[in-house]
């Protein structure tokens, strides 16, 4: 309870932060008893030093050439020789590139017993041992090596942690050393995450090399479908007409009318693909009589990509709504409009048929439901819901949305299903093709909801009843 | 600071996680000195064991029939008899259904002094004592019973905590036991929340049975208004015409044109209902001269549902915008368009009147403002704002939005307010009906902003000046 | 491990919370050994007491006139004299207005060694010392003064912390006292943030007076551009025609057609302004050969406002899409439509040219990309991305979005660039004016991407190569 040494400076000047742009401000009045040591006066080292100084720490930078004039060292930071710097502190941030690790062997005895933080990154994903393991096992085997801060860029350190995640994974074989660095990260304004022992450094060093891995499957599926559907619509309509009668008019209407049809097909198919894998998984569980049979990799990936598929479906459906609203006129969708007088050989139109209005009604409803699904899948909204609410929204509302979307497709296409001239080149019209999958899914879902199947599935999902299988020995 | 026993295994095999799909990965190199004991080798028990193993704990499962072949026990987990399992650990997870609690009495002496975690749930909401209290008071009165993890599903445990909230309420009468389980939950990757003493288990067991309780009032209001307004628009327009002259055309235009009118009425009314309870509360506080008079329950519920009402208003208004954009043509909204030539008895139209363009202007502005209000009411954005900013956006911008929305309604309806043939069956036209409430709210708000009332209200809200009332004795 | 005193009451009644509307519920069964003391029975004091009681603390309120009947003191709270209240506790919440601080001098000896929490706020921003420093230095120099809770309103305390941020900055020169108050804030359900020593109270007291400081630059720019562009479109079109030929028709079409043009110009310019400062910064770094030369303030502010500019661009672009969808008809955008027959001197139109459809295609694509950029800039989504993903989305996708938006503008305007009658009053038509900036930015970006410049810039950004400059001594 005694007044603590707010100004317990040694011979180094200590800079206290007073104001710093945006984000939370952490000011320490009691820096650790020892300054933080940074080896390497390069860009990262100086940025790290700047962040430490801003949050109230004393910092010593070790350099091979401490006398060199360095204009960008933060105020209050002492630059000295490597050995001298290390002798002053307990925690040493090793801000040198991976290539220079072998040079660190000469500091091996100086660093004995010190906490050495490896902040390095790899250039590309490989299966070799991590930089941190190499450092710990081959170079500084007498130091307590901690992996951390590699996910933080120099730019982020300088600009007050804006942009990118604030989560900082930290791991080490030494529990106390790890705890010290976790506390350091907290004090600097990060959210440290304990990744355990140093072997996890392989995962940690892979993180900054990821590029939206969860989105890979869904985006590939979307662009694949986009290409296929664009070609289908192009061939089945404008190109067919050009081949048969030399008419180029429909090709000119591809960027608007044709592409809007592609968007509609894509949105419905993506939405259907959100609910398909769950149906497959359910039938699989029913067939094997257990939920403990592992899913094959493709099904597992698909199940994990449902959220991404749904969000892409929402994006495409919104675009479809904007396109449709821009193009909605009798010139474009004449079969939805009541016919008016024919004047000088030109057909004029009135309001829509009830079919056209139903089209707008179902489309609007489906879009509204998809928006609700999209909002509830954001991390912050999702974290505020319990399991029952999450299932209610994503499963019940979601299936209702698929149902309404399919109705929208049927209302649109049903005027043409019986017109044989639309079945060109032995292919069905796009609206018919695209409604098959959602209709199948809805039928299978209804089948699963039948009392005997449903109760069996519920029992399997609770795990209480699984048939002993010869396969599971 | 000594190297800690990363591999301090007993006779059980310990499995260390190396990689796990998505989400943060927690690997413990120093499992607690004792393994975690799980009583019950059912679905939940095994899922819990799997999660524990993944995060680096040693686990022993106790079962009545430990010899039975169980294919789905996670690798490295020992299955043994209940008594033997309990003797090995300090923390015991009781993964048996509530119905089997009476059988636990035989383990009473084994469990003496142990931390017993009750993870059970109720089937439905009731007013009886919680499962945890029953266990603590009637069965295992010598154990330290902790309630926790009941909000976590087996599926969530297996699939890396994806979906649903990560918040785990934990309560117990024993503070140290609670602290141990809170630490365990943290280590497993959850966000534990200290709910205090075991009596709170009644609240905790109610959580998974909730289904969006905060949305109940707002959705009821919305669907009630939707039904009323649909009937009003249907009777006042299409049905009236059918009764009077046998015309069915307007009934066919209900899904598009009629429903769009319903959406417009609904959006404006929902938005008005966001700001109405605040006005009522202000007048109530002025009348009673104090802010400490409790609001009646209906007003309190209403005040707490304002955010939900606003988000529903945004959803409905967005739908109205899409519908309007699709239908916006002289055939539908002829009184907004300049008249062109009459050809063969058919009236053609040109561009819009300034009134029609003003309609789009006000509608677009109101929608943009509502979008801003909606975005700022999401948890993550809201958490980044201070009180003054929150009030500025939600109150000032919000009232401006209501004002613009009302202007939009007046611009639309004002062409018809003086046309007596729209007042059928002694009812006003929909646009007139629906603008009454927001106009009233705006007038009352202006009245409240008058200097003498406003300063009195401010004083009351600061709590400094409250008239002593006979009623409050 | 012994059963702790759940009911360790003294002579005061302790109220335990059982249920409380919404939000997390914290119930303490072991209140601190001493009750929390609150000086001041006003609004804030009673609200604070209510929150403390709800979370399981014992509370004593000190008042000058403890005998006065106070109807709104929470149940279980003792009201007594100031001295008596202070003698019972260790933590004292000073809930009196700043003006009454001088009266606190009489409690100076009573408060010796106590933790005194200053919860006051300033009326307006000034440069004087903070209330907390004044209290600590001039009034209660023998107490351990802690600043905290000033960001929390009485209303928020009463209504279960709904609305506004839950982050509570806390600072004090005494580390232990600060730690105690941080723990208290945690127990009350807040997220305390350690701001360090009491000097930081100046920043802390400024927080509630902020009004969206990060948005100031972007909103000013937006409204400035809005005013300029509105006047430009008004003068260059409708007013010019009025002056030249007395036609007022175009003025009547300003709220719809004219304003939609303003929205389009504004959206594209705002989007361009997101990417312009980065280009300027890059050329500046190339020119100086270092990244350590500080940016001038205007550039720094601009760089920090890019997110806000981008979100405003998205809002304006969405409005433009709604407006366009409502107005999209040959009467409004005749040069995008194929000509049909002329009947009775009136020109009728058919479908769009490919140019019109391309307009919708590019506009829709740009809007979709901007939506993705907007969603990924929300705090909760952003926190789930690593640095590489953030850069990929915000830089690569963002530039592609600017490119598509510029193409949209060129497709629209290119029909008129060669029509000299559009260059009225020596000014270019709006579409030409507004495409200059994005075209310039795209050219400069391409220039920067040329191998020699790009590799030099990359080196400068890594910080490895900075020319020693005379300027940086």
Image: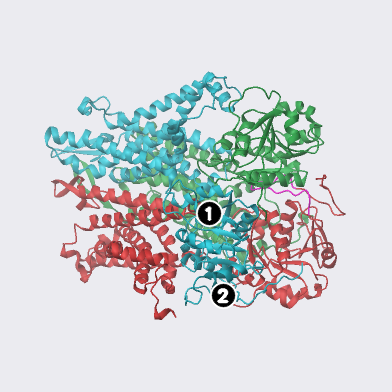
Chain colours: A cyan, B green, C red
Going 43% across and 52% down the picture, which residue do you hit? C389
Where does residue A95 sit, x and y in percent of width and height? 50, 63
Residue at 79 percent of width and 63 percent of height:
C90
Q: Does the magenta stretch include residue C26?
A: yes
Question: Main structural element of the magenta stretch: helix, strand or loop?
Answer: loop
Which chain hosts label 1?
A
CA distance for labels 1 and 2: 35 Å
Structural crowding at the residue carrying mark 2, measured as other residues with C-alpha within 10 Å and reported as few (<14), some (14–19) or many (≥20): some
Please provide percent x and percent y for residue A343.
15, 39
Q: In this view, does B391 lie to the left or right of C437?
A: right
Q: Where is residue A19 in the image (x, y as percent from the top left)?
A: 56, 71
Task: Quadrant for residue B429, please give it.
Answer: top left
Question: Mark 2 highlights which residue?
Answer: A76
Q: Which of marks 1 and 2 is nearer the N terminus?
A: 2
Question: Which quadrant of the view contains residue C274?
Answer: bottom left
Give the residue at the far right of this rendering. C11
Q: What residue did someone put label 1 on?
A: A138
Q: Position of C233 compared to B25: left or right?
A: left
Residue A5 location (% of width, % of height): 70, 72
Does residue C123 show up magenta in the picture? no
Residue numbers of the magenta segment = C17-31
In the rendering, which numbered label is found on residue B221?
none
- Circles 1 and 2 on the same subunit: yes
> SS of the residue at dot 1?
helix
Q: Nearer the viewer, mark 1 or mark 2?
A: 1
- Residue B17 drawn above or below residue A108: above
């Amino acid at each position: 309870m005694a007044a603590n040494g707010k100004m317990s400076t040694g011979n180094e000047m200590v800079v206290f932060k007073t104001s710093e742009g945006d984000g939370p401000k952490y000011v320490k009045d009691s820096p650790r008893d020892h300054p933080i040591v940074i080896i390497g006066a390069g860009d990262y080292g100086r940025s790290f030093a700047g962040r430490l100084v801003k949050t109230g720490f004393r910092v010593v930078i070790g350099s091979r050439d401490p006398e060199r004039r360095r204009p960008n060292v933060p105020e209050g930071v002492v630059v000295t020789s490597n050995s001298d710097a290390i002798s002053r502190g307990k925690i040493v941030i090793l801000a040198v590139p991976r290539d220079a690790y072998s040079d660190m062997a000469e500091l091996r005895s100086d660093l004995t017993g010190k906490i050495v933080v490896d902040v390095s990154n790899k250039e590309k994903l490989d299966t070799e041992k991590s930089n941190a393991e190499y450092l710990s096992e081959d170079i500084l085997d007498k130091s307590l090596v901690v992996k951390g801060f590699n996910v933080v860029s120099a730019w982020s350190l300088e600009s007050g942690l804006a942009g990118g995640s604030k989560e900082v994974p930290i791991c080490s074989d030494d529990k106390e050393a790890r705890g010290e660095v976790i506390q350091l990260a907290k004090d600097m304004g990060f959210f440290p995450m304990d990744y355990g022992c140093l072997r996890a450094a392989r995962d940690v060093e892979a993180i900054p090399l990821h590029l939206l891995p969860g989105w890979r499957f869904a985006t590939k599926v979307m662009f694949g479908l986009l290409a296929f559907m664009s070609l289908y619509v192009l061939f089945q309509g404008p190109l067919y007409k050009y081949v048969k009668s030399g008419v180029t008019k429909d090709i000119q209407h591809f960027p608007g009318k044709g592409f809007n049809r592609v968007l509609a097909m894509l949105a419905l198919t993506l939405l259907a693909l959100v609910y398909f894998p769950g149906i497959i998984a359910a039938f699989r569980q029913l067939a094997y009589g257990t939920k403990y049979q592992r899913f094959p990799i493709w099904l597992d990936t698909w199940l994990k990509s449902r959220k991404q598929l749904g969000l892409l479906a929402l994006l495409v459906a919104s675009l479809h709504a904007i396109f449709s609203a821009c193009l909605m006129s009798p010139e474009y969708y004449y079969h939805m409009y009541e016919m008016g007088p024919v004047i000088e050989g030109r057909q004029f139109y009135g309001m829509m048929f009830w079919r056209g209005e139903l089209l707008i009604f179902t489309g609007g409803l489906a879009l509204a439901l998809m928006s609700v699904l999209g909002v509830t899948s954001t991390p912050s909204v999702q974290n505020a819901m319990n399991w029952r609410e999450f299932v209610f929204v994503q499963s019940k509302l979601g299936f209702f949305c698929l149902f309404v979307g399919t109705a929208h497709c049927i209302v649109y296409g049903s005027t043409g299903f019986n017109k044989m001239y639309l079945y060109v080149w032995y292919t069905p019209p796009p609206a018919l093709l695209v409604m098959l999958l959602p209709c199948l899914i809805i039928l299978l879902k209804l089948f699963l909801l039948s009392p005997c199947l449903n109760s069996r599935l519920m029992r399997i999902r609770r795990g209480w009843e699984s048939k002993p299988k010869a396969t599971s020995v």
